[in-house]
């Protein structure tokens, strides 16, 4: 049967139908192809990195791509997840709080995503239950198959309709064999069947173990992992092998034989210095053309666009590799032992460092251990300091102590979100002499609540999805350091995730004492960027926004870049670079 006929036959949802495939209006069968990435053996192998790199190499060919992550957990979004367990909560422009992998996609593809690109089991099941209450299932008992799987397929097709994508990249969360992700795999099997041959490319990401005691690579775990996938009815087209070292021919041959995947599609995705090297690794192994062949997309590709895109990317990689000098930036935070909680921050420094021609060494400084006595020693080796976002009282006083130190000794400083609020508290206490100044998040009884809960937040109860979230415009004050960093753009757009803000009645006193609020909300008295005049400090900037979330390899965030340049200047005892513009950055308003 031709795929279009098949789709026509399954799109009915009568009470007798055994197949349930709700088809969004405007869906064009055959227009959108699907690449689905599954993880085997263990989680944390970088499915998002593989999927986004593959998406990038196809995008470079002129194809329109749209990623989607399917998460097995029952939460509606990632907003209430502890970054200790799940890594950072990434916020998209439309305000959805999602998995950190969405950050990887935005950075790799240089593309803004929306809530359509992120689905959890919680979202799928709520939709099913809503429909059940409305009687949409026409008297049927509602089942995992076909109703829940039908909803998964509907999400992919809705994304296809909304983005008009040539290729939708699906990343299945977790590992093959997890109970909570099994129905996603089943939905993908059905999807490939319904869409027909040449519509779907299945990619199995696996792990090749190299036990130190043996000193050689072993393929058994990878074989078993791929076998579990095949037991679900999925025949992979591509196998990507994560490993410490390049995966040898012998192991790849074994995997090819056991998984019936041709050798040239068994790809070694071994450790490398930066994830941004992976697109070139994929191209080098010919996987871009392999996927194009499998999906029969050759006639939609534009070789001249690819040449240009590849050149730009190669230039970036060359700069990344060429950076030889190192600067040290101290990150003064609370979750410093779990790197994934600062995934975007690390990337923003990598982008800024590459553009400024240095390697950024990050020194993680746990502020729960900072005191007045040890602060100078703990920060002595840092060329600059950054205080990231955070929540709650623990470690907050240590952050304030660090900021005071940075302010008084002229150490370049960037504060992000909570770091911005801590900078205001420090200034209020030590410069404005507002004794006991604090945030009501830390001390609800503070005499001077210079940071207080946003008026719109005061009525809200519960914790899910209720912060000031997503993209907002910022009005930039002319003739400030901030304005110079943003190339004098009058307005810029950044991402937010906070509940507290500078209490408006303290703004005047703070500004009188010398702090400049250089970025504000265009419509409300919400302070978004602050700085100290450069006559008093070489680089003291903080923002209520999560500037790292909009940093991209080819368009580094201007504030992070400013800090890195100030650190270079400090290290070489020169003046910080503030006037020089950042030619690659344009206001994204
Ligand atoms: N806890 C602060 C607030 O809610 C800062 C949040 C953050 O750093 N993301 O306003």
Image: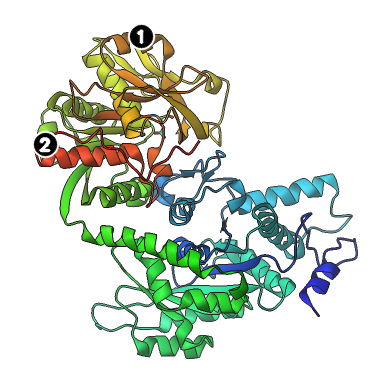
The spot of residue 533 in percent (x, y) is 24, 21
| Structural distance between the alpha carbons of marks 1 and 2 | 34 Å
Q: Nearer the viewer, residue 412 or 75?
A: 412
Q: Nearer the viewer, residue 365 or 12?
A: 12
What residue is shown at x 40% (from left), y 49% (from top)? Answer: 552
What residue is shown at x 53% (from left), y 73% (from top)? Answer: 203
Q: Is residue 82 above or below residue 7?
A: above
Residue 310 in the figure: left or right of residue 132? left
- The residue that label 1 is drawn on is 508
Q: Is residue 127 above or below residue 508?
A: below
Quadrant placement of the N terminus: bottom right
| Within-10-Å neighbours for mark 2: few <14, some 14–19, many 20+ | few
Determine which quarter of the picture holds residue 272. Answer: bottom left
What residue is shown at x 47% (from left), y 66% (from top)? Answer: 306
Give the number of the disc on residue 290. none
The spot of residue 482 in percent (x, y) is 33, 28
The spot of residue 93 in percent (x, y) is 53, 40
Assign a secondary structure to mark 2: loop
| Within-10-Å neighbours for mark 1: few <14, some 14–19, many 20+ | few
């Amino acid at each position: 049967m031709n795929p279009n006929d098949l789709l026509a036959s399954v799109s009915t949802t009568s009470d007798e139908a055994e197949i349930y495939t709700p088809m969004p209006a405007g869906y064009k069968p055959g227009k959108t192809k699907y690449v689905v990435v599954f993880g085997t053996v263990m989680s944390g192998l970088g499915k998002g990195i593989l999927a986004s790199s593959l998406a990038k190499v196809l995008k470079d060919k002129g194809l329109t791509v749209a990623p989607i992550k399917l998460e097995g957990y029952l939460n509606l979004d990632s907003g209430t997840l502890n970054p200790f367990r799940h890594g950072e909560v990434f916020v998209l422009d439309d305000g959805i709080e999602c998995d950190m992998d969405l950050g990887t996609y935005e950075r790799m593809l240089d593309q803004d995503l929306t809530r359509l690109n992120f689905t959890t089991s919680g979202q799928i099941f709520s939709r099913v239950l809503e429909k059940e209450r409305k009687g949409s299932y026409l008297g049927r008992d509602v089942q995992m198959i076909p109703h829940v799987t039908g909803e998964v397929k509907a999400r992919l097709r809705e994304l296809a309709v909304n983005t008009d994508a040539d290729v939708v990249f699906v990343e299945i969360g977790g590992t093959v064999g997890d109970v909570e992700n099994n129905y996603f795999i089943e939905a993908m099997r059905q999807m490939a069947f319904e869409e027909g041959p040449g519509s779907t490319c299945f990619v199995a990401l696996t792990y090749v173990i190299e036990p130190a005691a043996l000193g050689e690579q072993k393929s058994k775990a990878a074989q078993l992992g791929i076998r579990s996938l095949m037991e679900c009815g999925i025949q992979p087209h591509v196998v990507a092998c994560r490993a410490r070292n390049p995966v040898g021919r012998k192991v790849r041959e074994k995997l090819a034989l056991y998984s019936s995947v041709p050798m040239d599609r068994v790809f070694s995705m071994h450790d490398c210095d930066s994830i941004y090297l992976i697109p070139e690794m994929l191209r080098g192994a010919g996987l871009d053309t392999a996927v194009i062949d499998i999906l029969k997309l050759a006639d939609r590709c534009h070789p001249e666009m690819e040449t240009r895109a590849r050149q730009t990317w190669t230039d970036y990689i060359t700069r990344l590799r060429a950076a030889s000098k190192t600067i040290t930036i101290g990150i003064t935070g609370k979750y410093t032992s779990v790197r994934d909680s600062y995934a975007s921050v690390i990337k923003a420094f990598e982008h800024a460092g590459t553009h400024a021609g240095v390697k950024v060494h990050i020194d993680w400084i746990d502020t729960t251990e900072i005191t007045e006595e040890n602060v100078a020693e703990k920060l002595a080796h840092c060329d600059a300091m950054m205080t990231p976002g955070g929540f709650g009282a623990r470690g907050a006083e240590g952050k304030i102590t660090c900021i005071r130190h940075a302010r008084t000794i002229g150490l370049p400083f960037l504060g992000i979100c909570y770091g911005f609020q801590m900078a205001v508290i420090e200034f209020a206490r030590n410069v404005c002499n507002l004794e006991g100044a604090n945030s009501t998040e830390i001390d609800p009884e503070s005499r001077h609540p210079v940071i207080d809960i946003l008026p719109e937040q005061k009525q809200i109860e519960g914790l899910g999805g209720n912060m000031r979230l997503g993209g907002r415009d910022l009005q930039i004050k002319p003739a400030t350091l901030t304005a110079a960093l943003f190339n004098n753009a009058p307005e810029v757009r950044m991402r937010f995730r906070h509940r507290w803000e500078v209490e408006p009645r303290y703004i005047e006193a703070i500004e009188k004492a010398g702090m400049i609020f250089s970025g504000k909300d265009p419509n409300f008295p919400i302070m978004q960027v602050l700085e100290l005049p450069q006559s008093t400090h070489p680089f003291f900037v903080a923002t209520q926004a999560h500037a790292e979330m909009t940093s991209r390899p080819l368009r580094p965030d201007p504030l992070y870049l400013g800090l890195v340049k100030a650190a270079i200047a400090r290290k070489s005892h020169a003046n910080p670079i503030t006037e020089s513009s950042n030619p690659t950055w344009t206001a994204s308003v």
